Image: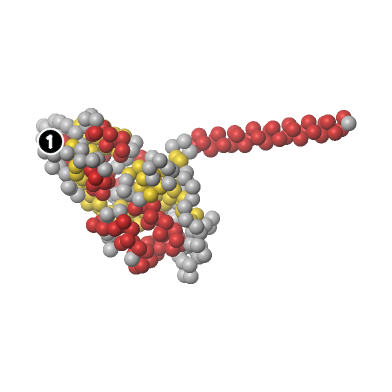
Amino acid sequence: MRSGRWFRLLWLVAAVAAVLMLFAACGEEEEEGAATATPARTGTPAATPAGTTAVGVPELADGVLQVGSDIAYAPIEFFKEGTTTPQGLDIDLANALAAELGVSTQFINTTFDGIIPALTAQRFDIIMSAMTVDEDRKKTIDFVDYLSAGTDILVPAGNPKDIQGLEDLSGLTAAVQSGTVQVKQLKAANDELKAAGKPEINVLTFDQNPLAVEQLKVGRADAVPADSPVVANDALLSDGKLEAVGLAIEAAPYGIGIRKDSTALKAAIEGALQKVMDSGEYRQILEKWSLSGGAIE
C-alpha cells in the first residue's frame, strides 16, 4: 500500500511539474513574440510541381512559406473586418507563389518598423508588406520586385490647404506610419524647408497607417503621406470625407524582402513569380485589388 501511494505521489508531482514547464515555455514564447501575432496557415500544400524551384530550399523544407507582414495597410494587406483572416494584394500573391512552390503559407503580423530585424532574426522566411525598395534597405536584405507605387497625400475633402506636394506641408502637421519611406521623404522636405528659412513640417508618427489616418479624420493632422494605392483606398472608404491629392512621388517598386544568405529561396521566389506572371494570375490579382497600374511586367 505504501509503495502504491508513493508511486501515485511521484506521478502527481511529475505531472504538475510538466504542466508548470509548459506554462513557463508558453510565457517565454509570448514575451519574445509580443509584437507579433500569427494567424493560422492558409492554403493547402500541393503536390510538389514537376520542375519546382522549391527543391533544395532549406526554408521550405517544412512545407510552409512564412511571410512577415504588417497587416494593416489596405488594400495591400489587411484583416477581413471582424476576423483574423488576412486579405489583400500581398496575401493573394504570396498564396499564388506558395502554390507554385508546392507549400502552404503562414502570415505573421509584425510591426513595420521592426520587420527587417525580425526577418534577419529568422522569425519568418520573407517579407511581403508593401515595402518600397530603396538603397538603405538593400544594404541589409535582398528583394524581388513585384509592383510599382509612389507616395500620394491624403487630405480632407476639397483639399482646403491646397496641398500639391510635400513642400506645401510647410508649417502644417503630417501624420505618417513609422518606418516607411514617407518618413524619410518628410525629413528630406524639412531639411529643404529649413535651408530655405521656411517653417518645417510637424511630423507625427504612428505604428500603423490607420492610426495616422484617424488623426486626419479628427483634425489633429492636415495630411497623411502614404503609398499611392493605400491613399486611394483610404479616400474611397472615407464616405467622401477624405481625398487623394493624386501624386506618385518618387515611384519605386515594392519588393519581397529576403535574407541575403537565403540565395536558394530568392531563386525559388523569382521562379515562382515568373510562373504566376506567365499564367496571367498576376494580372488577375492586381485587377482584383484595382492595382493594375502598378504592374511591373
Q: Nearer the viewer, residue 138 or 157?
A: 157
Q: Which of 260 and 206 is in front in this view?
A: 206
> Residue 18: where, in percent of width, then height?
67, 36
Q: Which residue lies furthest to the front in this view?
A: 239
Position of 204 relative to 63 (above/below) = above
> Residue 21: where, in percent of width, then height?
64, 35
SS for dot 1:
loop
Position of 177 relative to 277 (above/below) = above
**Visible residue check, residue 190:** no
Which residue was labeled with disc 1? 160
Position of 199 relative to 245 (above/below) = above
Q: Quadrant of the C terminus?
A: bottom left
Which residue is at 19% across, 44% downward? 244
For residue 225, what is the image quadrant? top left
Q: Along the horizontal axis of the image, is 144 left or right of 44?
A: left
> Residue 267: where, in percent of width, then height?
41, 62
**Visible residue check, residue 215:** yes
Task: For label 1, count other residues whose C-alpha is less than 10 Å away and answer few (under 14), some (14-19) or many (20+).
Answer: few
Which residue is at 44% across, 54% downward? 261
Q: How is the image coloured?
A: secondary structure
Q: Residue furthest right?
A: 1
> Residue 288: where, in percent of width, then height?
31, 56
Q: Which residue lies furthest to the bottom in this view?
A: 50
Q: Nearer the viewer, residue 25 or 241?
A: 241
Q: What residue type is labelled 1?
A: Pro
Q: Along the horizontal axis of the image, is 233 left or right of 278?
A: left
Q: In which quarter of the image is the N terminus?
A: top right
Which residue is at 38% across, 49% downward? 87
For residue 221, what is the image quadrant? top left
Which residue is at 53% across, 38% downward? 29
